Image (tube, helix red, strand yellow):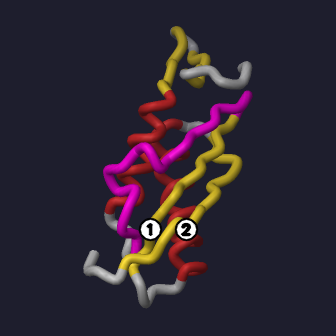
Amino acid sequence: MAENKDYVTTQLENGTVNINEEVITTIVAAALRDLEGVVTAKNDKKNIRVELGENSVAVDCGLVLLYGHSVVEIAKNVQNAVTNAVESMTGIKVSCVDVNVTGISMGNK
């Protein structure tokens, strides 16, 4: 599959399944929704980038985190939640989940 495609295609016995890049972005946003300490990117898809590869997908998340939480622990939780959600719902391997902390919020979640 070439870079910059909008779909990842899986060949099945009776035909193909095409999954749009936007679907994967929605899955990522949903996976972030309930994570403790994550303030943004819950419904803000503009901070989530998905790059479709030949047999995998790479995800980049720009997040604002809640003050008082461990940045490293939250990043690990984000990586696990995103990987599990995308792989279980689409069958597509997640090659990496990059977490970019763009700010800290002093407010409540």
**Left or right: 65 as drawn, with respect to 91:** left
Verify CB contact (< 8 Å) between mark 2 and mark 1.
yes
The magenta segment is 37-55
Residue located at (65% from left, 44% from top): 58
Q: Which residue is mark 1?
A: 64
Magenta span includes 49: yes
Residue located at (54% from left, 13% from top): 16
Amino acid of disc 2: Val
Spot occupied by residue 95 in the image (x, y as percentages of width and height): 70, 47
First in residue order: circle 2 vs circle 1: 1
Secondary-structure class at tag 2: strand
Q: Is residue 70 above or below residue 102?
A: below
Quadrant where the N terminus sits is top right
Q: In this figure, what is the number of numbered marks?
A: 2
Quadrant where the C terminus sits is bottom left
Q: In terms of depth relative to the viewer, which is nearer, 62 or 32?
A: 62
Q: Residue furthest left?
A: 108
Residue located at (55% from left, 80% from top): 71
Q: In terms of depth relative to the viewer, which is nearer, 69 or 15?
A: 69
Q: Which residue is mark 2?
A: 101
Q: Is residue 56 above or below residue 48?
A: above
Q: Residue furthest bottom?
A: 68
